[in-house]
Amino acid sequence: MVVVSDSDGKSTEGDWQPLQTVAWSYGKVRLIDQTILPDRIEFVEFSQWRDVVEAIRNMIVRGAPAIGCTAALGMALGARSIIADSKHAFRARFIEIAEAFRGSRPTAVNLFWAVDRMIDLVDSTDGSIIDIKDALIDEALKMLDEDIETNRRMGAFGAALLPDNGAVLTHCNAGALATVGYGTALGVIRAAVEAGKEIRVFADETRPRLQGMKLTAWELARDGIDVTVIADNMAGMLMRRHRIDCVVVGADRIAANGDTANKIGTYSVAILARHHGIPFYVAAPFSTIDFDIECGDDIPIEERSSEEMTHMNGGRIMPEGVKCINPAFDVTPGSLVTAFITEKGVIEPPYLRTLRDAAQDKPDISSGPRLTIGR
Ligand code: MRU
C-alpha cells in the first residue's frame, strides 16, 4: 500500500472537486483511506490484489456499492498477475481470487454481485488470456461509471420526495464515500439541494465506528450542506419535537420482500419514524437487492471485533471482563419502509411484487462520465 496524496481534494478556494472514493490509477487500485477521515484525506494505492481484500476487510473502503466496485477492480488487478497457459487454468486461479474477495465482508450483497459479474465476464469472453485480462479491467471501470450514473438517477427520483425547507435524518454514511461518488441516500439529499431545496440534515453519529459523525458530516460539510450530528439515542426526542420531516438511509442487502439490512441502528430509527408518522426511505441501487433471499431473516449479518466497542481512539472505554456484542448491521422489515428510491424510480409496497416487476425492466445506464485515472 502506498500513500499517494494528502490533499483535501480542494486545490484552491472555490476549486471544488467531487470525491472519487474508488478508482483505477495506472494499473493500481486507488482508494480514499476512510479510517483516517476526517483528520485528513489520504489516497492509497494498491498493486497487490490481496491488499485490496484486506482494505475491504479493514474498512479502508466501506459502504456497499464502494465495496462492490473495489472488489471488481481488485479482481481485475488479480487477473493481471495470473500466469496461465490455458483459459481453464486462468479461470481456476481467478476463482481463487474471487473466493478471497467473497470472504472479505459478508453482508453487503453488492460485493457478491460484483464478483459474480466479473466471473461471468471471464466465462463469456472469447479470445486470448490477455484479451480477458483487458476485458476485466474494462468491466470493472464500467461498474464505476454505472455507479455514479445510478446514484444520479436515484438522486433525481428521490429529490422530489424531500421537503423544501425541512430536515432529513440519515444513519451511517451512504454518501460519496460509500459509493464511487455522489452517494445513494446522500445523493438524494445532494440532488434536492441542487434542485434548490433548503435541506437540513441530521446525521446519527453511528456507533461504534462513527461513520455518521466522521464521514457523513465531513462530506456534507465539504459540500456546504447544513449538517448537525446527533448521538444515536437522540432521534426519538427530535422526532417527538417535530424536528425531522423524513428519514433517508442506504442499504447493504434488500431481500425480495423489502426487508433491508443496513448499518446497526437503522431498525430502531425505522420504528421511531413509523411511531411518529415520518416517512422512512431507503435509497439503493438494484445491485443491492438479493432476489435469492426471500426475507431478512436469511441475510447474513457481520459480527465485527468487540474491540470496536471496547476501545476508542486506541484507549479502552469499557470495563475489563464485561461482555459485549458487535453486530455490524440490522434488518428493518419492509413493512417499515415507506418507499425504495432506486435508479429505476421510486418503488412502493407491496415489495414482493413491485421490486421484481421493476427488476424486469433494467434501463441501460452504461453511458455517462468515466471516472478513470489512467490505465
Ligand atoms: O460497515 P459499513 O460502513 O460498510 O456500512 C455501510 C452502511 O451500512 C451503509 O449505510 C450502506 O452500505 C449503504 S452505502 C450506499
Image (spheres, grey):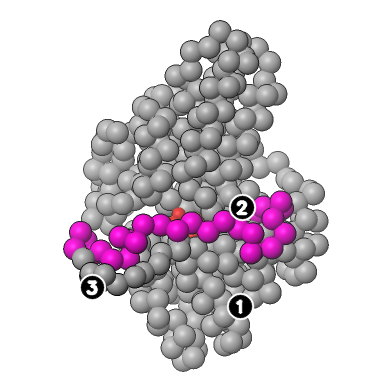
What numbered label is drawn on residue 288? 2
Q: Quadrant of the C terminus?
A: top left
Front tag of 3 and 2? 3
In percent of width and height, residue 341 lies at 64, 62
**Does dot 3 land on a helix, a strand or a loop?**
loop
| Residue 6 position in % (x across, y down) | 24, 43
Q: Which of the labelled discs sits on residue 279, or is there none?
A: 1
**What is the spatial separation of the Cα atoms under label 3 and label 1, in whole angstroms?**
39 Å
Residue drawn 75% across and 51% down?
Answer: 359
Residue that appears at 60% across and 10% down: 86
Residue at the far top: name it: 85
Is-magenta flag for residue 294?
Answer: yes
Q: Nearest to the eye among marks 3 and 1: give it.
A: 3
How many tags in the picture? Answer: 3
Q: Give the crowd class for mark 2: few <14, some 14-19, many >=20 residues within 10 Å.
A: many
In the rendered structure, which segment of residues is drawn in magenta?
Answer: 289-315
